[in-house]
Amino acid sequence: MNAIAEVRPIEPPATRAPAAPIVREGVFEIPGGLALHHGGRLSAVRVAWRMVGAPNAPLICALGGISASRWVCLSESPRRSWWSEIAGPGRALDTERCRVLSFDYLGGDGETTGPQRAERFPSVSTYDQAEVLARLLEHLGVGALRAIAGGSYGGMVALAFGERFPERVGQLIVLCATDHPHPLATAWRSVQRDIVRLGIETGRPAEALALARRLAMPTYRSAEEFGARFAGPAVFEQGRARLPVERYLAARGADYAARHSPEAFLCLSESIDLHRVEAGRICVPSTVVAVREDLLVPLSEVRGLVARLHCARLHEISSIYGHDAFLKESQQLRAVFAPALEDLP
């Protein structure tokens, strides 16, 4: 039976003496390669993974957006850890009570197999990412995950895994994702991909990727946040007016282009828009989080997903961070994660 719940932040738990987290990581090769959902085959697939947490604790897989990596938390550089506000000692995903596993996406920028520079990589499905995770669990000798916590693209992968491998996961925690992309979000992403393709064709791929990221940034956040941060006047420099929001977008675009490749962006952005799973076939108990201000995954779409799932609970939250709330709202997500993971030791 599906239910809707309003979420209010809860107080963090009392301070405990932290257990020393154990970090394991490695790279393994999938024997025989991998046949892909949309056709084609990769003859050799390497998968880079990382696990952080208390020894022998329940295992939870954490998956983020297309820019995320296996570095979920507790890296040498805070900038490298994409979910450090949510995962770690004493946080919503508490590495003193569980182990957090992740991997670099197939087709992405990490050490898992992906496109080389100027190379056309085959189309990758969220089902392919789910298959990679299943192979990783086999490699690690893990029968089943306690849960998958996935945000944005990671939530799509969680749903694909729940459909294909229900016996291998106890629960899905799906944030800012649904069973298919909204056409308006696809429209925005398709323009971004065309910008990047044009940049590759004209010999300016990094500039094009930066511009595509600049176009994407307003879709990740909310009108309220932009209004509060960037309402100041223009500054004239070298005869040109520069507005506060332009400086922000330019900085975010340049930073993204310095850390990511155009080819990986094209592969995983397309994978979002190819995403389709059969929600009616997913029987894994699911906790689903919708953000009312999310422009990319509208509330109505998430409500529809929950109606199609067999056993789901919907949490609706508000956040000035919009779609990026799954990265930023540590206290609101603590309130969501706590009941979902209440039986952890």
Image: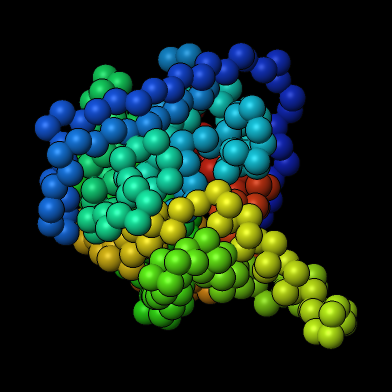
Task: Please tell me which residue lies in front, 239 or 342.
Answer: 239
Q: Is residue 102 left or right of residue 35?
A: right
Q: Quadrant of the N terminus?
A: bottom left
Q: Residue at x 20, y 36 (%)?
A: 44
Residue 88, given in percent of the width and then of the height, sits at 61, 31
Coloring basis for residues: rainbow
Q: Is residue 212 left or right of residue 250?
A: left
Q: What is the residue that sits farthest to the front in this orientation? A: 203
Total number of numbered discs in the rendering = 0
Q: Against 15, is 285 above or below?
A: below
Q: Is residue 29 above or below residue 204?
A: above
The vertical placement of 17 against 196, above or below, is above
Is residue 18 depicted above or below 233 in this figure? above
Of 46 and 203, which appears nearest the observer? 203
Who's the residue at 34% across and 48% down the image? Answer: 116
Q: Residue at x 48, y 14 (%)?
A: 55
* Identity of the residue drawn at 44% across and 59% down: 262
Q: Would residue 260 be seen by someone viewing this image from the given angle?
A: yes
Residue 163 image offset from top left, x and y in percent: 23, 50
Q: Nearer the viewer, residue 232 or 314?
A: 232
Query: Horizontal and vertical percent for residue 85?
Result: 65, 42
Residue 71 in picture, x, y percent from top left: 52, 35
Can residue 312 be seen in this snapshot?
Answer: no
Q: Seen in the image, is 196 located left or right of residue 30?
A: right
Horizontally, residue 236 falls left or right of residue 65, namely: right
Residue sitting nearer the eye, 111 or 224: 111
